[in-house]
């Protein structure tokens, strides 16, 4: 029977299977950050256990780390304790890669693993972080886990899992000018809903997906979790292989050739069956802006904020009313009339070099609007930051009135000092517009890097195709 | 892990769809390096009128009276009744830690987000998926009946309402066994350590670059 990519990745990692279908799945790569790991290490210590294979571990502190004034260290003592705890745990248990705070390559875990060649096709990749789905862009089976599972992987190098159903999301055709991977992902979430992918592993395919760079593919897979799917995957092709060649932890020499030969088999076979198929026409996807408090509450930039009176389902209607109230928006108002207070360009969704470039193109020679109090650009890693600086992007941002910061998760979830104040409205390239996500009472609109930069310049949302 | 067998528990309704884990336990509380003590901050932003900080004593914080957890009739609740896609978003296990620490042992909803669903079992919380019609009925009955309790029997895989209406739910034999006996996975998995080692050796021979 023809196999899906998901079948291949799954089958090649099953250590054993119980009668009820519960499997022990072998884990190749264990990514870690400071927020979801301390209790797992503590559990290991209490049980007198060691890490099963510490060379599977890639770790970095990213959630709590400040993005400016590094000379002042981490000023919040509770954040500092958490970061220090990761330092101590890695020192005790070991790792393949560890970039402590202020290391030149430090950054967001989902940015540093791929750029260092530590995410490879055919791997199983886990992390105590839902955006682990990102790594599926490489034809790897990657998903977020809880802290108990982090401890389980540390102790046994396996996870107890049942196989998910398989969904194919096929995007065919050419994307219009100004339409990015972020818009594709948001449009998919808008179509299938935030629970549309629950219980599934989503494979993204079609000519529009194949046409994306690795950075774009990572953005799409990153957002699989916002569609409810633990994992999103994309088959390996030459773009994948070209991205990996020469990266520090990618195989070299004869092993590289062997690996590439195997990686080329990592795609869905002709005629393989999926449990669900969603098809989209790339040409119909427009730049997207979320208006509500769930990523599925999203519209094309030319649209109007929905009117709850038009919704028949009472639970959904109440959801729209609550979202409008929280977001401080009027029903039926044009998206482009929404004024913003802050801009955030960064996060594991959109902080890679291509994202920096896309925002810089828009910002070049312009000025941030007077009503925008803060426009932050936070590169995803030290490597991204240095590359952007080598290209002069930092100067473009600074001259336009943006702040150019040090790498980290920053205002995506506001665990450090970068946050929204109550009622503030933000154009953000991050992944979640939940209530309070970017700071209590903060209002988040998710957009692409180019759309965020354009909103910073205009002071309100604009259609990037007309900017 | 605590065992779960049977519970006759007071129900507290959270009548919203897509409740995310940021709402269940906001990010500032994730800075803790402990597993315990999250219960007082469960649903912090919906529950309190001020801004919660880790370590805060919640006894005298201003509460939002309209929120279910603050209403007298739901004090001591052990069964959380929710809508679709409960627990979506971040994988933070702090969410089930907060729910368990507060005192909930059972959650009933039409659907749960995958990672949250799996995290719940690891903390001796039983997430029950019921049809939207049944959940709607439970919401209505709970609203109409003060002291509304449900009888949850894991062995029989049934939930029974005060009026005697009963429905059954699914759970994998593996999870049921672990919950009924209070077993956590690591010990069970390590029974198969030799099999894992054998797999690892074969895997390494096939894809040596994964072990470089």
Image (cartoon, rainbow, N blue to C red):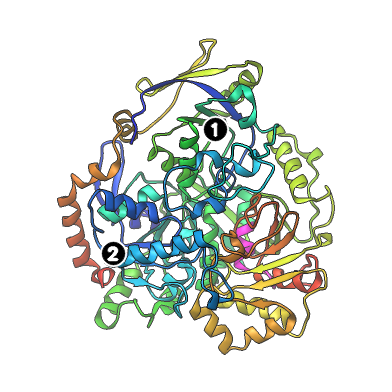
**Chain under numbered label 2:** A
Boundaries of the magenta span:
A175-186
Label 1: few (<14), some (14–19) or many (≥20) C-alpha neighbours in 10 Å: many
Point out which mark residue B110 bears. Answer: 1
Q: Is residue A177 magenta?
A: yes
Tell me the quarter of the image containing the C terminus of chain B. Answer: bottom left
> Mark 2–mark 1 contact, CB under 8 Å?
no
Place residue B139 in its image quadrant: top right
Q: Nearer the viewer, residue A456 or A357?
A: A456
Place residue A185 in its image quadrant: bottom right
Which residue is painted at 25% across and 62% down in the image? A53
Q: Is residue A73 magenta?
A: no
Residue A4 visible to an observer of this rendering: no
**Chain under numbered label 1:** B
Compared with residue A21, is residue A1 higher up or lower down, i.e. above or below? below
Q: Nearer the viewer, residue B208 or A321?
A: A321
Image coordinates for residue A75, horizontal then vertical, percent = 55, 67
Point out which mark residue A92 bears. Answer: 2
């Amino acid at each position: 029977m023809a196999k899906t990519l998901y079948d291949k990745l799954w089958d090649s990692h099953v250590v054993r299977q119980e009668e009820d279908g519960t499997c022990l799945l072998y884990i190749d790569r264990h990514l870690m950050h400071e927020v979801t790991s301390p209790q797992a290490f503590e559990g290991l210590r209490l049980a007198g256990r060691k890490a099963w294979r510490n060379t599977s571990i890639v770790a970095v502190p990213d959630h709590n780390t400040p993005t400016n004034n590094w000379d002042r260290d981490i000023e919040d003592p509770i954040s500092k304790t958490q970061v220090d705890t990761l330092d101590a745990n890695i020192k005790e248990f070991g790792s393949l890669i560890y970039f402590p705070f202020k290391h030149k390559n430090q950054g967001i875990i989902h940015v540093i693993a791929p750029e260092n060649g530590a995410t490879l096709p055919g791997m199983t990749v886990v992390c105590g972080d839902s955006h682990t789905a990102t790594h599926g862009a490489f034809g790897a089976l990657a998903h977020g886990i809880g802290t108990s599972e982090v401890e389980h992987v540390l102790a046994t190098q396996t996870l107890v899992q049942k196989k998910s159903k398989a969904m194919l999301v096929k995007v065919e055709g050419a994307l219009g000018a100004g339409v990015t991977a972020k818009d594709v992902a948001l449009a998919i979430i808008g179509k299938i809903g935030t629970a549309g992918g629950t219980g599934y592993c989503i494979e993204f395919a079609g000519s529009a997906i194949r046409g994306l760079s690795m950075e774009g593919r990572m953005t799409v897979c990153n957002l699989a979790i916002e569609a409810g799917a633990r994992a999103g995957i994309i088959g390996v092709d030459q773009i994948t292989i070209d991205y990996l060649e020469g990266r520090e932890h990618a195989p070299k020499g004869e092993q590289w050739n062997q690996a590439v030969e195997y990686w080329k088999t990592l795609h869905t076979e002709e005629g393989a069956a999926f449990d669900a198929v969603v098809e989209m026409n790339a040409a119909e996807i427009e730049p997207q802006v979320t208006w509500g408090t769930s990523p599925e509450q999203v519209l094309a930039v030319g649209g109007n904020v929905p009117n709850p009176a038009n919704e028949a389902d009472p639970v959904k209607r109440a959801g729209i009313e609550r979202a409008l109230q929280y977001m401080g928006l009027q029903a039926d108002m044009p998206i482009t009339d929404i004024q913003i207070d802050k801009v955030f360009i960064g996060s594991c969704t959109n902080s890679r070099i291509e994202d920096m470039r896309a925002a810089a193109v828009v910002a070049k020679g312009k000025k941030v609007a007077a009503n925008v109090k803060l426009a932050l650009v936070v590169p995803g890693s030290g490597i991204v930051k240095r590359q952007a600086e080598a290209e002069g992007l930092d100067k473009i941002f600074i001259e336009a009135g943006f702040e150019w910061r040090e790498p980290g998760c920053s205002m995506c979830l506001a665990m450090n000092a970068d946050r929204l104040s109550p009622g503030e409205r933000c154009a953000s390239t991050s992944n979640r517009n939940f209530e309070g996500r970017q700071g209590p009472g903060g209002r988040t609109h998710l957009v692409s890097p180019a759309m965020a930069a354009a909103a910073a310049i205009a002071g309100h949302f604009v259609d990037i195709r007309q900017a | 892990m605590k065992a779960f067998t049977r519970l006759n528990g007071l129900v507290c309704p959270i009548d919203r769809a897509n409740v995310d884990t940021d709402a269940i336990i906001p990010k500032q509380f994730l800075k803790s390096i402990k597993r315990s003590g999250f219960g007082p901050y469960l649903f912090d932003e919906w529950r309190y009128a001020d801004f919660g900080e880790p370590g805060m004593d919640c006894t005298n914080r201003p509460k939002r009276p309209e929120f279910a957890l603050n209403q007298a009739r739901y004090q001591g609740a052990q069964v959380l009744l929710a809508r679709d896609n409960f627990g979506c978003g971040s994988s933070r296990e702090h969410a089930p830690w907060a729910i368990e620490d507060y005192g909930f042992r059972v959650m009933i909803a039409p659907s749960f987000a995958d990672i949250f669903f799996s995290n719940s079992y690891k903390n001796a919380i039983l997430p029950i998926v019921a049809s939207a019609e049944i959940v709607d009925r439970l919401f209505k009955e709970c609203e109409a009946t003060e002291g509304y309790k449900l009888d949850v029997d894991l062995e029989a895989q049934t939930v029974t309402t005060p009026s005697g209406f009963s429905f059954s739910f699914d759970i994998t034999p593996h999870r049921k066994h672990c919950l009924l006996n209070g077993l956590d996975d690591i010990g069970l998995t390590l029974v198969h350590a030799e099999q894992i080692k054998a797999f690892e050796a074969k895997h390494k021979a096939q894809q040596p670059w994964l072990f470089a």
